[in-house]
Image (cartoon, grey):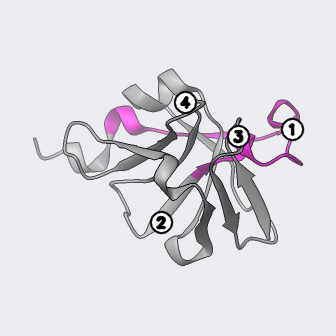
Amino acid sequence: MKILKCHCGDVQAEINIDKFEKFFRCNCSICKRKGSIMSIVKNEHFKITKGIDKLKLYQFKTNTAKHFFCINCGIYTHNNPRINPKMTAFNVGCIDEINTFELKNVSIADGNNHPLDKNK
């Protein structure tokens, strides 16, 4: 179990994960700007435990993905990606015991060439 916290601590979540399998960044227009390193779990393994009323939802383009930010400190905490809304991608920088500057092999998810945009 890992605890995720925004900067001010108003938003907290429990992540039911023992070992991180993958760390990644996305190069889509919003992820490029926020610069977060993320990991991902099934929705049932991610639970907001504090501050659900402090979360702001942001959506764009197809309005399928759901990006969440703390309304107090502005920190991006997590999202439900449009490629698989049954998953929660979360900002590993919000987990105190992870130093994102020490992570190796952070892959890039190609959100610029999203598979759901191919037929347009």
Residue indicated by mark 2:
87
- Residue 11 % position (x, y): 62, 50
Residue indicated by mark 4:
74
- Residue 120 % position (x, y): 10, 41
The tag earlier along the polypeptide, 3 or 2, is 2
Is 67 situated above or below 52? above
Quadrant of the image containing the N terminus: bottom right
Density class for disc 4 (Cα within 10 Å; few <14, some 14-19, many ≥20) is some
- Amino acid type, label 3: Val
Is 72 situated above or below 43? above
Q: Is label 1 in a helix, a strand or a loop?
A: loop
| Disc 4/disc 2 C-alpha distance (Å) | 22 Å
Mark 4 and mark 1 residues within 8 Å of each other at the beta carbon: no
The tag earlier along the polypeptide, 1 or 3, is 1
Residue indicated by mark 1:
99
**Nearer to the camera, 25 or 57:** 57
Q: What stretch is highlighted in magenta?
A: 90-113
Tag nearer the camera, 4 or 2: 4
**Nearer to the camera, 102 or 17:** 17
Query: Which numbered tag is attached to residue 106?
Result: 3
